[in-house]
Image (cartoon, rainbow, N blue to C red):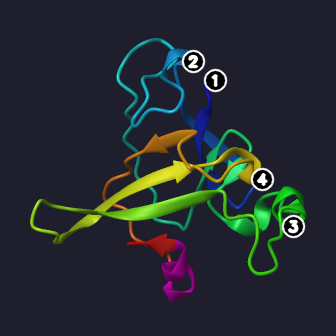
Amino acid sequence: MGSPLSLDCCKDNVFRIFTGNVKDSQTVNPRRSDGKRGTATFANKAAFGFKIDSEYSDHRLNNAALDKTAGCVGTCGQHVRFFKVRNANGNVKKGKYIMTMDFSGVNYDFNDNSSQPDSEQPDSEQWRPFCRE
């Protein structure tokens, strides 16, 4: 499916970055719906999150009902995750992440949509536990 990738500035202000090409489902860095490379550049000094289709990078905004039905008892709704990018020597590449998503926590494979945002910094220590290494 061609999922839209958006910036979420406090849920009421969502700005679409691009919509992915339907042929690129379950790929890393999907092309845009027009077939061009799925990249975008933006400048934002305020805190923001990402929204991929119906899933937010802020787990508190996601529907966690399916997670709870599947047995989640802790922090549920974590359908978008971030992993630090490492080089061939295992060193973390500063500001480089892989962002990946699982629709509604259906099967927890986290390969429904994946992108590589660059030059991002977690907003505060509060969010660092959700950035997996």
> Mark 1 belongs to which amino acid?
Met
Circle 3 sits on which residue? 68
Looking at the rendered image, the quarter that the N terminus falls into is top right
Mark 4 — residue?
12
Provide the residue span drawn in magenta.
124-130
* Amino acid type, residue under disc 3 in the picture: Lys
Residue at 64% x, 48% y is 102
Report if the CB atoms under discs 2 and 4 are less than 8 Å apart: no
Disc 1 secondary structure class: loop
Reading the image, the residue beneath label 2 is: 22
Query: At label 2, which amino acid type do we have?
Result: Val
Residue 23 among magenta residues: no
Residue 64 vs 50, above or below: the answer is below
Q: Residue at x 29, y 65 (%)?
A: 95
Give the Cα separation between the discs numbered 3 and 2: 30 Å
> According to the image, label 1 marks what residue?
1
